[in-house]
């Protein structure tokens, strides 16, 4: 099967996906494209819709696991500058869905705008953060959204005001294919220097809480409402449990440690072991933060 004509300059075939992801695991995709403009993006989506080609959007790759057998459709990588612009209009931050969340946070603090500095240290893109309503104990990103523009799986561009959107625990109603951009309403900081220092301190603290063992680490599960995933895993006797070259961290069991030579199948097997054991011993169904393609 060949991709529809007219996109030969931006579509590649049998592209290895592991280098684009945090865990560096997984197989290839049938088609891969890095559009440089919104028109190219829309054209690709329309072509896939007409030909019934499955499509996925790759952001920062920080919470994605590619299966060893790969993905049979088109993977879109929105790393071009057209999808990562960051602009300010007073206390409104407007950014493309492809912008790195770290850049969005630091740009806001650099402008002396408060409200999202607590999200420092969360990897991935703004689009990914909005899809999963990235949050800390200080709040979630959804409460800041004033407007969002999305591209549907049929190639239609739709706009939503904040009042039309719904955000909950690690979830949002922003479930269309692509978040083209979003506007966040922030507050002018009374003391911009203090705001910057707060962001830096939060970043240092978050880094200190991350394990350094192994080549890659990832948080696979969402904390269930009223529970802590790490505590549930530890109380189920799984701290340090290993599946091949993938291990639950022995002292920080909310992290998986993936060593060189591991496979996606080993990660999936360990995830299934964790979920089934926690469900049997604690009566709680853990929900994945990690998306498996």
Image (cartoon, grey):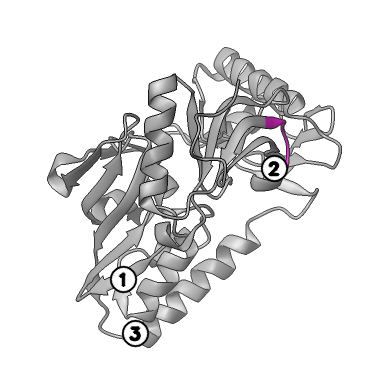
Label 2 environment density (alpha carbons within 10 Å; few <14, some 14–19, many ≥20): many
Based on the picture, tell me whether residue 195 belongs to the magenta stretch. no
Answer whether residue 249 is visible to the viewer in this image. Answer: no
Find residue 9 and report its horizontal and vertical position in percent. Answer: 56, 47
In the image, which disc is placed on residue 87?
A: 1
Majority secondary structure of the magenta segment?
Answer: loop
* Residue drawn at point x = 65 percent, y = 46 percent: 20
Q: Which quarter of the rendered picture does the C terminus lie within? A: top right
Extent of the magenta region:
24-28
Kindly report which numbered mark, 1 or 3, lies closer to the viewer in this rendering: 1
- Compute the Cα span from label 2 to label 1: 31 Å
Q: Which residue is mark 2?
A: 23
Asked if the residue under mark 1 is in contact with the one under mark 2, i.e. CB atoms within 8 Å, the reply is no
Q: Which residue is mark 3?
A: 192
Based on the picture, tell me whether residue 26 belongs to the magenta stretch. yes
From the viewer's perspective, tell me whether residue 108 is left or right of residue 66: left
- Compute the Cα span from label 1 to label 3: 18 Å
* Residue drawn at point x = 58 percent, y = 69 percent: 204
Label 3 environment density (alpha carbons within 10 Å; few <14, some 14–19, many ≥20): some
Q: Nearer the viewer, residue 228 or 28?
A: 28
């Amino acid at each position: 099967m060949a991709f529809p004509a007219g996109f030969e300059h931006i579509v590649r075939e049998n592209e290895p996906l592991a280098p684009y992801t945090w865990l560096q695991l997984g197989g290839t995709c049938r088609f891969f494209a890095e559009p440089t403009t919104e028109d190219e993006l829309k054209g690709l989506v329309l072509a896939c819709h007409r030909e019934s080609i499955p499509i996925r959007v790759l952001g920062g790759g920080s919470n994605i696991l590619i299966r060893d057998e790969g993905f049979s459709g088109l993977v879109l990588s929105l790393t071009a500058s057209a999808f990562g612009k960051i602009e300010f209009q007073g206390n409104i931050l407007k950014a493309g869905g492809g912008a790195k969340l770290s850049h969005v946070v630091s740009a806001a603090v650099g402008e002396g705008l408060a409200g999202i500095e607590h999200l420092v240290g969360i990897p991935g893109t703004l689009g990914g953060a909005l899809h999963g309503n990235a949050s800390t104990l200080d709040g979630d990103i959804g409460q800041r959204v004033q407007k969002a523009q999305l591209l549907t799986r049929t190639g239609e561009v739709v706009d939503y005001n904040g009042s039309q959107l719904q955000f909950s625990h690690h979830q949002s109603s922003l479930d269309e294919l692509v978040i083209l951009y979003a506007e966040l309403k922030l507050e002018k900081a009374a003391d911009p220097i203090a705001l910057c220092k707060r962001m830096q301190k939060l970043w240092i603290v978050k880094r200190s809480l991350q394990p350094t063992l192994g080549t890659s680490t990832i948080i696979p599960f969402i904390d269930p409402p009223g529970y802590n995933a790490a505590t549930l895993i530890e109380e189920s006797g799984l701290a340090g449990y290993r599946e091949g070259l993938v291990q639950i961290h022995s002292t920080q069991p909310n992290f998986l440690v993936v060593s060189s030579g591991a496979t996606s199948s080993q990660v999936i097997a360990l995830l299934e072991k964790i979920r089934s054991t926690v469900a049997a011993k604690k009566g709680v169904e853990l929900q994945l933060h990690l998306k498996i393609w």
